[in-house]
Image (cartoon, coloured by chain):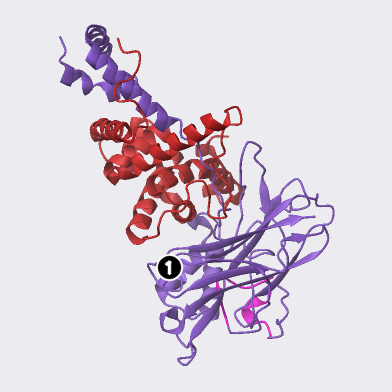
Chain colours: A purple, B red
Amino acid sequence: MATAQHVEQLFSAAIDDELSPAQEQSFHDHLRQCSDCSTSYDTFTEAIGTVRALPKAAMPLPVHLPTGAPTAERATAADRLRRLISKRLPMGAATGVAALAAVAIVVVGLTRGSAPAQETPATLNHAGKNTNAPAAADNQGHQGASCPGAATAGTVPSFTYRTSAADRSRPGQQLVLSASDATAAAGSQVQIYAVLTIPAQAAGAPGAAASAATTSVTPCLSVTGPSGAAFAAPLPAAGPAMGQNPVSATNTIAGDTFTIPPGTAPGTVIHVVATIPANYPNTSQAPLSATLTITVR
Amino acid sequence: MDDEALLERARRGDRDAFAAIVTRNQDDLYTMALRMLGTPHDAADVVQETFLRAYTHLPELRGKTVRAWLFRVAVNCARDVQRRSTRRPTSPLEDSAGNVIELPDPALGPEATALARQQAASVRAALLTLPVDFRLPVVLRDINDLSYDEIAEALRIPVGTVKSRLNRARHMLVDSLQRSGAVSSTAEGGA
């Protein structure tokens, strides 16, 4: 005959149907004869039922992946990207590796609610207002540069539609993302401004001006929309591509524009995401992201 | 196509295959991280970091199930985030973009909805009172529905330890829920 204490130790296995046939027989025999244990088991199952009834949550942000091939079997592209970064962003080895790992953007499907909708990247045109600086030689043959990229101070657009993000692991840093409007018509252009400000002493980038109060960094940017609209552009096979690369390091402002594809249905929600990967610019720093939603009117 | 088949394609450099793995698993990982950490921002960071690590360590996945391995990476990321994060918990009803992520059941009336919400909040709070080593088995088993073997692989502990921690954690959870009134101290309808 099982004791009450022994039976209580079987509650967890019982609720998972993990009891052996002999244990199950003994367990239920005891519950039929012991009202205390039976009541306790009812309470136990009720409590665990409330945990199991908690709703599943939906990942609220698109996941960003590196641009390189997902295996070491295609190291050539990764090596090319590493060389690109090492030339354009004078960083320490650890920071360089971290930036390589998160250097660009592939936005994969984002499902929400009861009607999941695949989302794919839209074209992000980095023809910012102040892109008068000459493109570096590395940029030739590519449609953009690596990100995050260093940016010097420039005129900041006075967009009122904005959001910002900070993190304890990034003291003094602030990621700001703003857009020219919260709504936009199909076929129109939307201007984006995104910048991460870093206290100069914490920037960790060799060559940073000692007198500057802050260093500005252009984050990785992506734009996503439902695949049912004209956003369903195919993903590039490999390497840097439109929509994945923000402003080159020589640009003076993080001004970017993208076009809402003509024919996009009113009410379509477009997500603009600015991301700074973990360990950038210094190690032990958490990833940082900010998201704005723009509704097609 | 199952995760293992997608993984083989991803190993051959197929980005779309990896993206499919992400799409298939991101909500489960996010739910785990959210229930473990309690903050949507941190949970989203965990998911992002998990897939980044997975993407750059695909060769290490050989011989393992994708799901258990992703959870293992996510658990490690969540532990890292928990160690370095001192953020105050945000509203559990909002994600990092301010969107509601747990909608009330429209079939319930206002009163029942309020009660359900209150009970869910009590359960979430009770979970967060458990020590991490005991919280994780409960989250992985009762919320993510992982098998004992998968939990053992995700937490890198023997199956026997999974069972004992799960048993102890569930009893701690029941005590906590009883104290908060989320469940009755003496269940109705006992034998």
Q: Quadrant of residue A141?
A: bottom right
Can you tell which quarter of the image residue B130 is in?
top left
Residue at coordinates 74% horizontally, 53% vertically from top-left? Answer: A231
- When the figure is inspected, residue A137 is found, relative to residue B185, above or below; the finding is below
Quarter of the image with the C terminus of chain A in it: bottom right
Lateral position of residue A125 relative to residue B186, left or right = right
Question: Mainly helix, strand or loop, the magenta region?
Answer: loop
Tell me the residue that label 1 is attached to.
Answer: A279
Q: Position of residue A293 (x, y in %)?
A: 66, 57
The reply, left or right, for residue B33 in relation to residue A62 is left
Relative to B151, does residue A14 appear above or below in the rendering?
above
Residue at 66% of width from left, 45% of height from top?
A: A118
Q: Is residue A225 magenta?
A: no
Chain name for mark 1: A
Q: Residue at x 27, y 43 (%)?
A: B133
Question: Range of the magenta residues?
Answer: A134-151
Q: Is residue B63 visible?
A: no
**Of the residues shown, which amino acid type is indicated by label 1?**
Asn
Residue B147, image x and y in percent? 37, 30
Packing grade of label 1 (10 A; few <14, some 14-19, many >=20) is: many
